[in-house]
Amino acid sequence: MSVVIPVILSGGAGTRLWPLSREMYPKQLLALTSKQTMLQDTVARLAGIAQALAPIVVCNEAHRFTVAEQLRAVEAGAAAILLEPVGRNTAPAVALAALKALEMASDAVLIVAPADHVIRDAQGFQRAAEVAVSLANQGKLVTFGIVAYAPETGYGYIRRGAGTGPSYPVAEFIEKPPLDLATQFVASGDYYWNSGMFVFKASRYLEELRSFAPDILEAATAAFRAATSDFDFVRIGKDAFVECRSESIDYAVMEKTRDAIVLPLDAGWSDVGSWSSLFDALPADEDGNVLQGDVLIHDTHDCYVHSTSRLVATVGMDDHIVVETKDAVLVAPKDRVQDVKELVAKLRKSGRSESALHREVFRPWGSYDSIDSGERFQVKRLTVKPGGVLSLQMHHHRAEHWIVVSGTARITRDNETFLLSENQSTYIPIGATHRIENPGKVALHLIEVQSGSYLGEDDIVRFEDNYGREGTDT
C-alpha cells in the first residue's frame, strides 16, 4: 500500500479578509470558524485519512515560527516545513513538496490541500480522500469538485466528462464565470466548483510537470537541491526559486494532462475567500446576524459584526460587514466585499503598515503590541513566552525603559546580567547591547518605553539570536 503524505499549502495572504487577515498574519493562522486556527483544523482533518503520515507544510518564510508554534500547540508533528523565499503559486510549491515526499517514499501519494479552507463534514471529506488515493494509485491526477448549490461567480468551475461515477474525467476547467453562465452551470449538474485540492502520486505529478512545464520543474529542483536545514525548517534555495515562473497547478498540469479526474465532494466546503463567504460559513442568530466579540446591535439584520478590542455598536444596518481591530475598522455592504482587495492595494501603495501588520506583532519569543506613539516616543507591551529569548541586539537611534508588569525577566545590558521582577525597571541607553529572557514557567509581561530620533523596527543590529534571525529585522 502506498504511503499517503498530506501537503498543506500555507502561503496565502488572505487580503479579502482584511483587517483581520494581513500579509504577516493571514487567515490560515486565525481562528475564524472554530476554536482552532484554520491551519490547525486542516491538520486535524487530514490526520483522519487512513494511512496518512505527518504532513509536509509549505509556507512563507515570514510565517515560519507561527506555523511551527501552531502545529506544536495541537501536538501535530510535520514531516517537513518548507520555506518559500518568495511566492510562486501552487505548481512550484507542490513540486517542492513532491521532491521532499520522494525522499521519504518512492510511491508517495500526495493529498494537497490549502490551509485556509473550511470543510464541515470532515468524515465525508476523509472518505472521499480515500477514494481519491485509490485513483491516484492507478496513475490518475485527482481534483475534488465541490457540488455546486448556487451560481457563485467567485469560484472557478470544472466540467465533468462522461462516466458512471463516482469519479469522472475532467472535460474542462472554466475561469470564474459571469452570473448568467454560472446559473447555467449549476442547472446542468455537470459542473463543480474548483476546490483547489488534489490527490496524485508525487512521481506522476513531477512526470506531468516535466512534460508540460519543464522550466518550473527545473527551477524547483534546483531550489530544492540548494535547500538548507534551519531548526524545524527546510529553507529552499532563494536564487533558483526566484527565477521560477509563477503558475497554478491547474494551468501548469491539470488542464493539459490526459489523466485528470474530478471526484465530486459534498462536505460543507468553503474557501472563506471573502467576508460574505465567512458569514455564510458561520451560524447566524434569529435576525440573520453573525456577531463576534463585544457587540451591541439595534434594528440590525443579516450582518457580520466582529469586535476585537472594544465595544462595536450598530443601529439600523442590513446586509453589512463591520470588522474592528486594534488599529483599523472596515465597514462595507456584503455585496461589495470582493473590493476589499482593492482597499488593501491602496494601503500598500501609500506605504501604510496596516496592509501587512497588526498592531500586535508576533515573534518567535512572543509578541509586542504598540499601544501608544508620538514624536520621539513609542510605548509597547511585550509578552515573552516561558523560555523565550529576544536577540542580543543594540540600537543606534533609541533608548529603552523596561518595566516588568508580571513574571521574571533576565536582563543582559552590555557586560552585566541581572533579574527583574514585578514592578521593577531598568534603562537601556542608546548603543548598549541588550537582551530580555524569560527564565520562568509563566509568561513575562513588560512595558517598553522607547525614546529617540528614530523608532523604526529596522534600527536593530542583531549579534546573537536563538531563532536564526541574525541580519533581519523580523
Image (cartoon, rainbow, N blue to C red):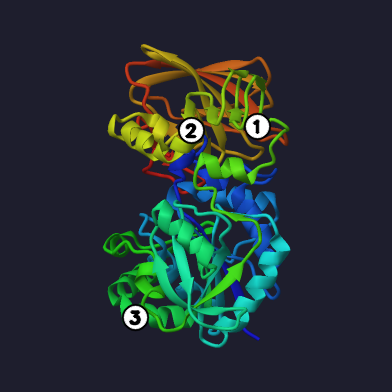
Q: Position of residue 357 (x, y in %)?
A: 44, 34
Q: Earlier in the sequence, mark 3 or mark 1?
A: 3
Q: Residue at x 36, y 16 (%)?
A: 452
- Relative to the observer, which residue lies in front, 61 or 430? 61
Q: Position of residue 97 (x, y in %)?
A: 48, 69
Q: Which mark is residue 210?
A: 3
Residue underneath mark 1: 289
Q: Position of residue 281 (x, y in %)?
A: 63, 46
- Quarter of the image for residue 405 reads top right
Asked whether disc 3 touches disc 1, contact meaning CB atoms under 8 Å apart, the reply is no
Say if 255 sits above or below 469 in the image.
below
Amino acid tagged 1: Asn
Instruction: Tell me: 405 left or right of 348.
Output: right
Residue underneath mark 2: 19
Amino acid tagged 2: Pro
Q: Position of residue 322 (x, y in %)?
A: 54, 27
Q: Residue at x 43, y 33 (%)?
A: 393
Q: How many marks?
A: 3
